[in-house]
Amino acid sequence: MKQTKNRICNLGGSLLDLQPHLYGKLDQQFQISSDHDDLAKLASPKHHLFIFCWQADNDRLMQQAISICHHLRKKIIVLHGKEKPTVTEINSNAAFFLSSEREKIFEHLIMTLRLCYSSQASVSYTSNNTIELEHIPEIIKQNLDKSLREDQLAAILGYSTSHFSRLFYRTFGTHFRTFVLSARLDRAKQLLKQNKQQSVSNIATRCGFNDASYFCKVFKRETGVSPLSFRQTN
């Protein structure tokens, strides 16, 4: 039986017109629908993978798309050129920005699709190329609200878990779990300082902690103060 292709919803600019080579490679492995300004597709259960092709003239549409994804707790990948669009910090976790001019853009895009949508759709692909480890921190920081497992990321990159663990430590001088926890806490500190009215529970969720009590325990263990005390003094 022929396997059904995952469906990619192309919003904003036309991926076919703007990036024909990239579109051709994606089209071999995905079913791509060109919906452009139809943001209702973001709420459709039939659509799981979203790529927004950003241009200066559709910036408002992009902001609306990211806001919708934020409220629906979904992810959207924003593909841009040399100039990177800006987005309000409160919605930033919903979007992953990827420059179409970077090397190995197809491999980066595939890896981002698999990581961003691992809980919503099974993204399969065929590729013999791997992504340099130097880009992993960017991937992690863009997905702190998700469950980030070392074995999952290793599989996405084409490594065994043990080999990935050694490479990660050799490259960054720290273990994967330590790096992720540090990134989560840095994001929490940022949100606690910038969003004085946001509940600690909501901030915990946005930083990848499913339990607010556990978040408070870890935060105090690592910083010496509770999240509320940190907010009051910052």
Image: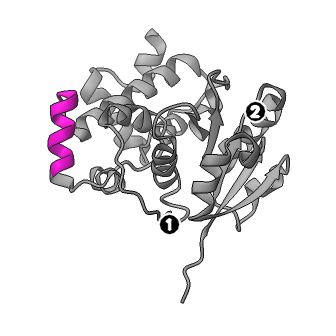
Residue occupying image coordinates x 21% and y 56%? 160
In contact (CB < 8 Å): disc 2 and disc 1: no
Looking at the image, residue 35 sits to the left or right of residue 222; the answer is right
Instruction: Find the distance from the CA under tag 2 to the CA under tag 1.
Output: 27 Å
Residue occupying image coordinates x 63% and y 55%? 24
Where are the magenta residues, as a range? 163-173
Task: Name the foreground residue: 163 vs 121.
Answer: 163
Dot 2 or dot 1: first in sequence order is 2
How far across and down, in percent of the image, does residue 83 sit? 65, 21
Name the secondary structure under disc 1: loop
Task: Name the foreground residue: 194 vs 151.
Answer: 151
Residue occupying image coordinates x 17% and y 35%? 169
Asked if 112 appears above or below 155 in the picture, the reply is above
The 10 Å Cα crowd at callout 2, few under 14, some 14 to 19, many 20 or more, is: some
Q: Amino acid at mark 2?
A: Gln
Looking at the image, residue 21 sits to the left or right of residue 119; the answer is right
How far across and down, in percent of the image, does residue 84 sit? 63, 23
Q: Nearer the viewer, mark 2 or mark 1?
A: 1
Q: Is residue 73 visible?
A: no
Looking at the image, residue 87 sits to the left or right of residue 147; the answer is right
How far across and down, in percent of the image, does residue 230 sit? 41, 17
- Find out whether residue 170 is within the magenta segment: yes
From the image, tell me which residue sits under label 2. 63
Name the secondary structure under disc 2: helix
From the image, tell me which residue sits under label 1. 122
Q: Is residue 134 visible?
A: yes
